[in-house]
Amino acid sequence: MSLLVWDKRPREEAHLFNPAFCATALHEFVKEYQKAKGAAAPYALLFCVLAIAVHGKTRRALPGSTLTSLYSWRERNPEVLVGFAERARSLRPVVQEALRFAIDRSAMAFADDGGVTLGAKPLVVAKKFEDALTEDARECIAAARLLGRWLAKAGTASTIMAAWGIKP
């Protein structure tokens, strides 16, 4: 999928895949990953975040806490793999656009190891901002945060991606 020029995108697509919103979700993932792991988030994992957090069925299937093992959860929820690889692949341009948006604003940056960290001017996702979002959008942001904490505990990027049925 390649992205259309902004004003040529279907309205629903433009709203859902707005670079600022997607950058916020990725930022919150990176922030929580860094807090939990003490290291940059692997670049490859960013391509999983939106495919999980924005997809309603997958997002609603996520565990309530990070105490649940990714691997045992995935075994109990095999339906989350249906269409995941294609969804992750089709969202690649959206993730790249959101990452460029965040990097251009110094909200995120690349680490020396190629991972992604918070930038010199990390976002502050204020309660007022979140309260103005739809319930669905708030759930996407909350899922991205959970994924940051959860995937930080789940192993290497390649084993995490293997659990989702994809390769880096």
Image (tube, helix red, strand yellow):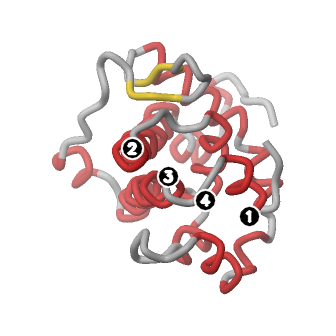
Tag 2 residue: 28
Foreground label between 1 and 2: 1
Mark with earlier residue (4, 3): 4
Describe residue 25's horizontal placement relative to residue 56 as left or right.
Answer: left
Describe residue 108's horizontal placement relative to residue 78 as left or right.
Answer: left
Q: Which residue is drawn at 32% across and 53% down?
A: 133
Quadrant assignment for the N terminus: top right
Q: Which residue is drawn at 72% across and 27% down?
A: 4
Mark with earlier residue (1, 2): 2
Above or below, 48 relative to 122: below
Tag 4 residue: 52
Tell me the CA gap for discs 3 and 1.
14 Å
Tag 3 residue: 152
Foreground label between 4 and 3: 3
Tag 1 residue: 163
Tell me the CA gap for discs 4 and 1.
13 Å
Q: Furthest residue to the bottom?
A: 76
- The picture places residue 114, in percent across and down from the top left corner, at 61, 23
Q: Which amino acid does label 4 sit on?
A: Ile
